[in-house]
Amino acid sequence: MGTKLLVVDDEMNICELLKAYFENEGYEVKTANDGVEGVTYFKMYEPDLVLLDLMMPKKDGLQVCREIREVSSKPIIMVTAKDDVFDKVLCLELGADDFVVKPFDMKELSARVKAVLRRYASHDNQNDDEVIKFDNIEISLQKYELKLNGKSVDIPPKELELLYFLASNYNRVFTRDQLLDKVWGFDYLGDSRTVDVHVKRLREKLQDVSDKWILKTVWGVGYKFEILQ
């Protein structure tokens, strides 16, 4: 069975176009035409990746993304008709892996789908069973689990991967471009604001957890997980 895609978009012509294109590339494609149907189909169909429109009836793409992230870490690419920074940031904060703006080039969209699937597969096949531990924090990449003060905390996959990478290289500064390369992959087509969004969300979760380490901004350079002396 081929890779399964779920296309959720209220524009029938978009669904038909994407279904025909990706089936021609060897994918198995299902389509849904509103947000409610999209959530139902996701649970029934268990796709490998979701192409999710932002503006839809019944439930918009943000709500659908939020509900999918409550039950799954499968990749989501948001599709929006507005090239709006706020919408892009919000999509990333809710756990989307990438976004494209309508009208999009089919070859670029295909490249993004392949890139996101490769990144997901590389992390899904991790054999690293080490748990990184510092004061009041445990990070397991294999289990995709974050524990703060001994309690599991809900966290989107990409936030956990970023935190794991920084903590496993503690006291070392990384630029935004380096983090995009190491965490998102060299073929990621987004921009460095993605890193800032994820760091902001991590800081909200990590606030007041410990006074022995910090997720620190090194102004003019980037970020590091610093162990405090």
Image (cartoon, rainbow, N blue to C red):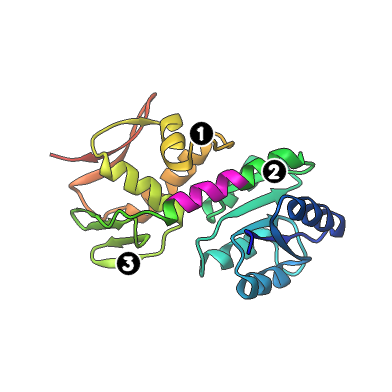
Q: Is 120 included in the stretch rendered in magenta?
A: yes
Spot the residue most to the left. Answer: 229
Spot the residue most to the right. Answer: 13
Q: Is 31 included in the stretch rendered in magenta?
A: no
**Badge 3 amino acid:** Ser
Q: What residue is pinned by disc 2?
A: 109
**Badge 1 amino acid:** Ser
Residue span colored magenta: 114-122
Q: What residue is pinned by disc 1?
A: 192
Q: Is residue 145 left or right of residue 73?
A: left
- Disc 3 on helix, strand or loop? strand
- Disc 2 on helix, strand or loop? helix
Which quadrant holds residue 9?
Answer: bottom right
Main SS of the magenta part reads helix
Q: Distance between the residues labelled 2 and 3?
A: 35 Å
**Badge 2 amino acid:** Leu
In depth, the one of 161 and 4 nearer the eye is 4
Q: What residue is pinned by disc 3?
A: 152
